[in-house]
Image (cartoon, rainbow, N blue to C red):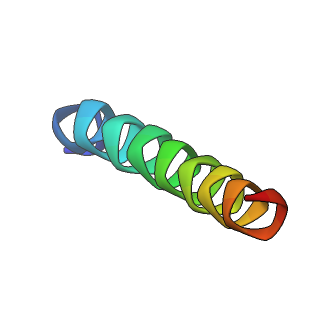
């Protein structure tokens, strides 16, 4: 059921957040460098 998918959904959301933050950080560093 939902409880079987919940950990994967949470991991997916966490990974999405991290990659989005990582991309914005890399773009900011590119702009200043």
Q: Which residue reaches farthest right?
A: 32
Residue 4: image location, x then y, percent: 16, 35
In this picture, residue 17 sits left or right of residue 6: right
Residue 19: image location, x then y, percent: 48, 53
Give residue 3's quadrant in the image: top left
In this picture, residue 17 sits left or right of residue 2: right
The count of marks equals 0
- The front one of 17 and 12 is 17
In this picture, residue 28 sits left or right of residue 18: right
Name the residue at 41% across, 36% down: 10
* 20 vs 8: above or below: below
Q: Which residue reaches farthest front?
A: 33
Name the residue at 33% across, 37% down: 11
Name the residue at 24% across, 41% down: 8
Tell me the quarter of the image containing the C terminus. bottom right
- The front one of 33 and 3 is 33
- The front one of 12 and 1 is 12
- The front one of 18 and 11 is 18
Tell me the quarter of the image containing the N terminus. top left
Residue 23: image location, x then y, percent: 57, 61
Residue 32: image location, x then y, percent: 83, 59
* 27 vs 25: above or below: below
In this picture, residue 24 sits left or right of residue 5: right
């Amino acid at each position: 059921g939902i409880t079987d998918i919940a950990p994967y959904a949470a991991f997916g959301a966490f990974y999405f957040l991290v990659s989005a933050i990582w991309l914005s950080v890399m773009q900011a560093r590119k702009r200043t460098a």
